[in-house]
Image (tube, coloured by chain):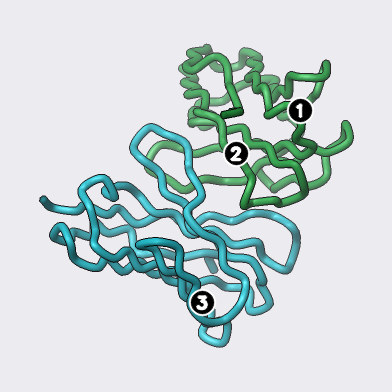
Chain colours: A green, B cyan
Amino acid sequence: EPEVTQTPSHQVTQMGQEVILRCVPISNHLYFYWYRQILGQKVEFLVSFYNNEISEKSEIFDDQFSVERPDGSNFTLKIRSTKLEDSAMYFCASSPNQWGVETQYFGPGTRLLVL
Amino acid sequence: QKEVEQNSGPLSVPEGAIASLNCTYSDRVSQSFFWYRQYSGKSPELIMSIYSNGDKEDGRFTAQLNKASQYVSLLIRDSQPSDSATYLCAVILNTGNQFYFGTGTSLTVIP
């Protein structure tokens, strides 16, 4: 069964450093999403991406965040200068159509710890 | 005002009982509602979606939507220990196209 994969599973970084979280969406999917979940808190939408551009973003997704699809398979989330409060689980998701939630698949997540 | 609200629980039910999970949302004109299950340390997985007032059944799960009361619920019949997880309510608000999750309700099914 196809699945969304994410690397790394865990990332530890120093405050102020840049991190890149990687996702490989399901191959025939067209819409890609990033969410984050701070420990013990709710899942929060960050951004959606379609046709090589951002289609929707939340207030959380400020200038320190960026997304990119550098090739035909990877979808990345970059945090330019990490803060302590960026520590969270980051989930990537993909779907064949916009907000196709019946077929929106979540990846296993990357746990980011900023020290 | 929070967009999506759930009781955090924990909710405990004996095996075989009905578990009832509730969710309210702020945007009266929201159209799309979802229940996800999340095991500890894992990613959310979709259980059900519901778009129209009334009940929608899928196996042991029934979603109920009341748009007038801005209320959506999930019933789990014949609860099993494997149902023990956090259940997340999610709504696409009509004010935009963003996907809002509630904080989740922790369910424990006691064998």
The residue positioned 76% from the left and 19% from the top of the image is A73
Q: Residue at x 46, y 17 (%)?
A: A115
- Callout 3 amino acid: Leu
Quadrant where the image shows the N terminus of chain A:
top right
Residue B8 location, x and y as percent? 33, 58
- The tag on residue B108 is none
Q: Position of residue B97 (x, y in %)?
A: 74, 58
Q: Decide: few, some or many residues near mark 3? Use Cα within 10 Å; few <14, some 14-19, many ≥20.
A: many
Q: Which residue is mark 2?
A: A105
Where is residue B99 drawn, in percent x and y?
64, 54
Q: How many other residues sit within 10 Å of disc 2, few (<14), some (14-19) or many (≥20)?
A: many
- Residue under numbered circle 1: A67
Which residue type does callout 1 highlight?
A: Val
Q: Which mark is residue B65?
A: 3
Residues at marks 2 and 3 on the same chain: no
Q: Find numbered disc 3 in the image and state the secondary structure of the residue it sits on.
A: strand
The residue that appears at 35% across and 40% down in the rendered structure is B39
Instruction: Indicate whether A6 appears above or below B48.
Output: above
The one nearer the camera, B25 or A17, is B25
Give the residue type that dot 2 points to.
Answer: Tyr
Mark-to-mark CA distance, 2 and 1: 18 Å
- A27 lies above or below A39: above
Instruction: Choose the circle earlier in sequence order: 2 or 1.
Output: 1
The secondary element bearing badge 1 is classed as strand
On the same chain: label 2 and label 1? yes
